Image (cartoon, rainbow, N blue to C red):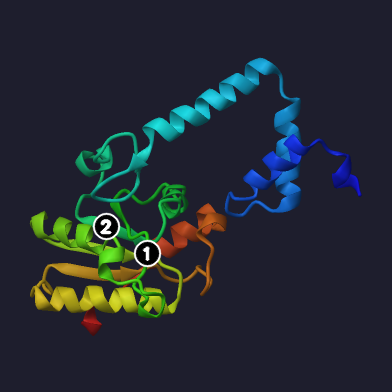
Amino acid sequence: MADSLLPPAIDQLTDRLRHIPGVGKRSAQKLALDILQIDAEDFDELTNAMKTMRDTVQLCKISGVFSETEVSPMLSDERRNQHQICLVEKPTDVLSLEKSEVYHGTYQVLHNLISPLDNIFVDQTNLPALFSRLETLIGDVELILFLRSSFGADATVAYIREYIIQKNWQDRITISRLAQGLPLFFNADYLDQATMIRALEDRRSISASL
């Protein structure tokens, strides 16, 4: 009954906000009402900031992280260990690891995990970009897995292992997995700093099983 008292424009914005992952009907409605009540100047600044973000932020064509340039500055940042690559599924997963403040390597966003049952194969992932990076890097490289436990994660890691064997890279590429402190089916968005630090420090190599 209460919803029927709201003007249609509010309901329309509420419905659009519900398309944002993780935003339910109640949260979307509250956000819509909050936006309605901010003053005109703040509203203009908000809409301008949103448009600027949409116009300038893209995905790095190599690593897949959020960037304002075609290739993320991270890949040329001398303060970062270019031979340490953390594999994540989504660009937002990068934020979870960054908040640990102890990881200073780089990232590879896969976007999709291999899942034949869902018709997702290597070409639908960012694995080709990862393999291209590995081709160009000289010396030892550590791949750190930061993937939720799932069939897709297992299939993806198995493919990476097999690719490394085919390329005869076993002696120079180490695969490690974040260790204790992470729940089996973790949500990267809600991991605290202490948990991330512990998981990073206690990561273990799984290359021995190659």
Pick the front one: 13 or 122: 13
Assess disc 1: are there few (<14), some (14-19) or many (≥20) residues with their C-alpha within 10 Å of its C-alpha: many
Where residue 54 sits: x, y (%)?
44, 34
Q: Please, what secondary structure does the residue beneath circle 1 have?
A: loop
- What's the mark number on residue 70? none
Q: Position of residue 36 (x, y in %)?
A: 73, 29
Q: Amino acid at mark 1?
A: Asn
Q: Which mark is residue 112?
A: 1
Residue 190 falls left or right of residue 98: right
Tell me: residue 163, above or below residue 103: below
Which residue is depicted at the point 33% across and 78% down? Answer: 155
Quadrant in the rendering for residue 137: bottom left
Please identify the quadrant where the C terminus is shown. bottom left
Q: Position of residue 58 (x, y in %)?
A: 35, 40
For this view, does 96 lie left or right of residue 47?
Answer: left
Question: Residue 153: percent from the left, percent from the top?
Answer: 38, 73
Q: Name the amino acid, label 2.
A: Ile
Q: Earlier in the sequence, mark 2 or mark 1?
A: 2
The label nearer to you, 2 versus 1, is 1
Q: Nearer the viewer, residue 195 or 90?
A: 90
Going 23% across and 39% down the picture, which residue do you hit? 77
Residue found at the far top of this picture: 41
Q: Nearer the viewer, residue 207 or 64?
A: 64
Q: Residue at x 75, y 43 (%)?
A: 29
- Mark 2 sits on what residue? 85
